[in-house]
Image: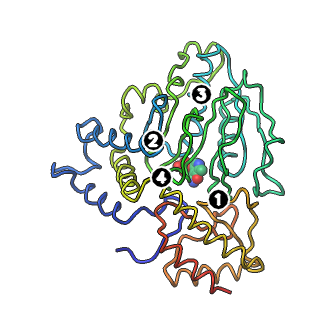
Amino acid sequence: MREGFYFGAGPAALPTEVVKQAAKEFVEYENQGVGLGEISHRSKQATQIIDDAKSKVIEILKVPETHEVLFIPGGGTGGFAAVIYNLMAAFAAKTGKKGKADYLVTGTWSAKGAAEAKRLGVETNIVFDGKKDGKYRHISDQSEWKFSDPAETAFVYFCDNETVDGIEFPQLPQVPEGTNLVMDMSSNMFSRAVDVSKLAVLFGGAQKNVGIAGVSLYVVRKDLLKQASPAELTQLGVLIGPSVFDFTLIAKNNSAYNTVSIFAVQVINLVLGDLLAKGGLDAQEKESNAKAEKIYALLDARPELYLTTVAKAARSRMNIVFKFKDADTEERFLKGAAELHLTGLKGHRSVGGIRVSNYNAITPEAIDRLAEYMSKFN
Ligand code: PMP
């Protein structure tokens, strides 16, 4: 067993049994005399691992026939660019036009997604910007959102859970009929049910809730695999994306167009196997909610000590952020926690304070230990 509990935001804790199994398979996989960091990504075993991981994603997220599951390198940041290239090319194929992009900015990561679109020369509209006095604290009322004309919009983008700011959408945002909705689920995937049929693309880096760095998961609506050719894109003045991010090529090659990390995909496979064995997504969602509620209840019980800034309706179940009135108290809190082997609690460097990451691998026991410490701390 590993001593203590690590609440870091990502890369993040994985179930101990999964880590042990993965370590074994890194040394040798199925008595083949070769480990998963060494085996060919096109071998029979590798193909089986990709297929198994895919079918678990399909089972757990209830991915409909209309959608395809892909594993692609490049992390969450790669995803910012990948969705731009692919959805602009799909929009060009469908309409013969250069599309625009709409972004719902609720925190650091959606702001970065929007910045990437601007950087790549996409005409970008910010549907709303949650930043006030330099901070993200809420999701504004839907009546204040300003979408572009759906006929001109290649996609609407949002980040379901803002890892740095501790803001999570309570449900899928309502967007104009017929627009392609893109969801960054890097830090809350597999923590709750999601209606995939409403999404054009769901994506996220694996390294928080479902695996390790090195691979990202994408669920892509299949009609978006029909994309304008490089010549057509050039004519329209739309950027041509690199092949490593080309959803069509990757889908055709069962996620092995180039060398995908089979080890990283197998970790996803093992994590999802563990999730299924523990009762699937319903059980996980209940557990995630109960763990988060326990910490928020402690914060709300002592508002003079624990300062919370995120509006209650937008509170993240995955990244629970709070502050103390001064730096000394914060330091004392972190030091006392570390003495109990409760680590990884320091907030993101851009916002400071404390961040409790409550991902799937954080057990109820870990939360109980932290809660006990927090209830006594003063
Ligand atoms: N989106 C979200 C919600 C994230 O939390 C992160 C990373 N913390 C990213 C995107 C960027 O991921 P990466 O570091 O894998 O590029």
The numbered mark, 3 or 1, whose residue comes first in the sequence reads 3
Residue under the point 45% across and 77% down: 4
Q: Are marks 4 and 3 in contact (CB under 8 Å)?
A: no
**Mark 3 sits near ligand 1, with its Cβ under 8 Å away:** no
Q: Label for residue 316?
A: 1
Q: Label for residue 281?
A: 4
Q: Are marks 2 and 4 in contact (CB under 8 Å)?
A: no
Residue 232, percent from left and from top: 58, 13
Q: What crowding class fits label 1: few (fewer than 14 Cα within 10 Å), some (14-19), or many (20 or more)?
A: many
The numbered mark, 1 or 2, whose residue comes first in the sequence reads 2
What element does badge 1 sit on? loop
Residue hosting label 3 = 87
**Mark 4 sits near ligand 1, with its Cβ under 8 Å away:** no
| Separation (CA) of disc 3 from disc 2 | 18 Å
Identity of the amino acid at label 2? Pro
Q: Nearer the viewer, residue 229 or 324?
A: 324
Identity of the amino acid at label 3? Leu
Q: What crowding class fits label 3: few (fewer than 14 Cα within 10 Å), some (14-19), or many (20 or more)?
A: many
* Quadrant in which residue 256 is drawn: top left
Residue under the point 62% across and 52% down: 161
